[in-house]
Amino acid sequence: PEAATPEAAADAGAPAATPGDVAAAAARSGDIDPSRFPTELGEGATASVPDNFPGDVPIYPGSQAAQGKGIEIEGSAQSIVQFLTNDAVADVQRFYADELAAKGWTLDPQTENEAEVGATMQATKNDCKVNVMIRPAEGGGSDIFVVTEC
């Protein structure tokens, strides 16, 4: 799967934007700062989503894969992908909570969400597990780490 293309969303009922809101929206729009991408990838890692990444695990819209790796351990397909986005941790966390539940994943109630540190959530579906870790990026945006095991 590939990351979805960014979509412009406007809420006609939203209050008028303040200058701070406009600056934050401008920071989130557009391309991701190239300096956020790793300059070197570990052995076997690529700057893409691995082939064994489960199709029912959502990919944050507009995010870009910074690095990914798929492996198999004792017959269990596992993958890890780092996605980058210009969006805030809270927006990313809300998306994953909603989308995983909509796709039939059972969210662990032990989800952690601390604005300064980020958010962590776990979900299960049949014999599969997914861990999503969202960390604030220096200068704005979020780094999303998705680890799967099926």
Image: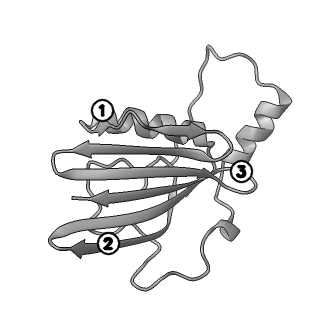
Instruction: Give whichever of discs 2 and 1 has the lower sequence position.
Output: 2
| Residue shown at the point (43%, 77%) measured from the top left | 46
Q: To which residue does mark 3 refer?
A: 140
Asked if marks 2 and 3 touch (Cβ < 8 Å), the reply is no
Q: In which quadrant of the rendered view does residue 126 lie?
A: top left
Q: In which quadrant of the rendered view does residue 11 lie?
A: top right
Q: To which residue does mark 2 refer?
A: 70
| Residue shown at the point (59%, 46%) measured from the top left | 118
Q: 148 left or right of 27?
A: left
Query: Residue flagged by tag 1: what amino acid is it?
Result: Ala
- Seen from the viewer's position, the closer of residues 114 and 148 is 114
Figure check: 128 above or below 76: above
Give coordinates of residue 77: x percent, y percent.
22, 67
Q: To which residue does mark 1 refer?
A: 102
Q: Residue 41: in sight, yes or no? A: yes
Instruction: Give whichever of discs 3 and 1 has the lower sequence position.
Output: 1
Query: Residue flagged by tag 2: what amino acid is it?
Result: Gly
User: Most extreme residue toward the front, as rendered?
Assistant: 110
Asked if marks 3 and 1 touch (Cβ < 8 Å), the reply is no
Local secondary structure at mark 2: strand
Figure check: 35 above or below 3: below
